[in-house]
Image (cartoon, rainbow, N blue to C red):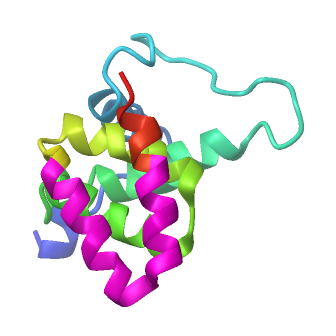
Amino acid sequence: MSAKDINEPAAGADLRAAGLKAMREALPGVFPEGDIDLRDGLLGEDLVEIGLTSVYGALWAREGLANRDRSLVTLGILIALGAETELRTHVRIALTNGVTEDEIAEVIYHSAGYAGFPRATAARSAAREALAR
């Protein structure tokens, strides 16, 4: 068996199942157990299903990086993209994966040097919203 075979999840239904498992681990208590339909009948209803298989099933379910490391990488990418909506969710996921609030702040500080101060400021606001208790 090659390294490629070990690191890549299976396709199809297995990829969806791997995605559901990864999403449930990332967001405990958000998704009920069993097979669930994530479609809502509105415009673009398949987007969450696409993310489930292509992001959570094909990427988060891979071996090679710990989920904590994937969270740090994801935070940096979302900050660079200016994707504050997704960043709010991934701040919570990062906490679940063992990233501390101080480390989230450090990712934001570090991103200012590479993605720019406006992106870091927007990320700080999004993270503050996500961390509001």
What range is drawn magenta here?
Answer: 102-126
In the rendered image, the vertical position of residue 69 relative to residue 17, given as above or below: below
Res. 74 image quadrant: bottom left
| Magenta part, dominant SS | helix
Residue displayed at 10% across by 69% down? 1
Residue displayed at 31% across by 52% down? 60
Res. 24 image quadrant: top left
User: Quadrant where the C terminus lies?
Assistant: top left
**Magenta-colored stretch includes residue 62:** no
- Which of the two residues, 82 or 60, is positioned nearer the viewer here? 82
Residue 73 in the image: x percent, y percent?
Answer: 28, 67
Task: Count all numbered tags in the image, as a single digit.
Answer: 0
Q: Is residue 11 visible?
A: no
**Magenta-colored stretch includes residue 124:** yes
Residue 106 in the image: x percent, y percent?
Answer: 19, 65
In the rendered image, the vertical position of residue 31 relative to residue 100, given as above or below: above
Residue 103 in the image: x percent, y percent?
Answer: 15, 56
